[in-house]
Amino acid sequence: MLRQSTQRAVALAALLGLAAGPAAVLAPGAWAQGEPTKALEASGSPFNLSAVNTLLSRGDAAAASGNLSEARRLYDQARDATRRLLGFYRDLSGSFRGLDARIPREMDGKGREALETMAKANLRLAAVFRRQNQPEVAVPLLVEVVKVMTPANEDGRKAYQQLVELGFAATPYNAPGPSSGS
């Protein structure tokens, strides 16, 4: 009985245009199964990393076809989305510190993934600027990658190598090789 009245309320709200959020959250048949879907897990949502990765893939396709302005636009969108996600993850992590360790751990993990994704977006955007003969615009992006990923990380090393190639840095960095357990 309660489920039917809830379904009616949602249907009425949808008819009145009041349910842009909750009605869109539910997949067809979700009420019948009693399990609403998670709206932000959809790939079209700007609040997940799979959507950002889709933007990066679309940017890659545009760059490969020579449409550098479209690639730049898509990489910029990916960067902006990861920056927003990072802020949200940090805010939630800080809000729950000392209250429930599981939530900061989850948000910190998502934040690390977002940082890695942002570094990839920065590297790709820097490559576009280099192809457009705008190295001065690529430098801040590359420095940011080195800063957030560190030269110990492969993306950080790639960014630093590009800074050397551009002449911004002169000293090459030779990462120590993997140590063997003799």
Image: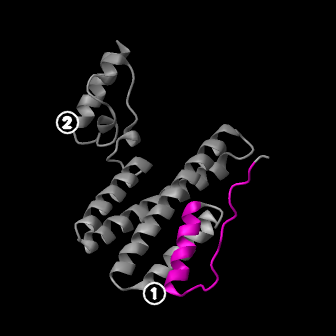
Residue at x 40%, y 42% (from the top left corner): 40
Tell me the residue that label 1 is attached to.
136
Outermost residue to the top: 1
Amino acid at the residue labelled 1: Glu
Task: Give the alpha-carbon distance from disc 1 to disc 2, as whole Å.
Answer: 53 Å
Where does residue 175 sit, x and y in percent of width and height?
Answer: 66, 66
Q: Is residue 58 visible?
A: yes
Left or right: where does residue 143 sit relative to residue 12? right
Question: What is the quadrant of residue 149 in the picture?
Answer: bottom right
Tell me the residue that label 2 is attached to.
15
Where does residue 161 sit, x and y in percent of width and height?
Answer: 55, 75
SS for tag 1?
Answer: helix
Q: Is residue 48 visible?
A: no
Q: Which residues are magenta?
A: 154-180
Question: What is the quadrant of residue 26 in the picture?
Answer: top left
**113 or 77, which is in the foreground?**
113
Amino acid at the residue labelled 2: Leu
Left or right: where does residue 113 sit relative to residue 17? right
SS for tag 2?
Answer: helix
Residue at x 60%, y 65% (from the top left corner): 148
Residue at x 30%, y 68% (from the top left corner): 71
Residue at x 65%, y 71% (from the top left corner): 174
N-term mark: 1 or 2: 2
Q: Is residue 96 above or below residue 5?
A: below
The residue carrying pointer 2 sits among few (fewer than 14), some (14 to 19) or many (20 or more) residues within 10 Å by Cα, namely few
On whether residue 175 falls in the magenta region, the answer is yes
Disc number placed over residue 60 in the picture, else none: none
Q: Is residue 98 above or below residue 53?
A: above
**90 or 73, which is in the foreground?**
73
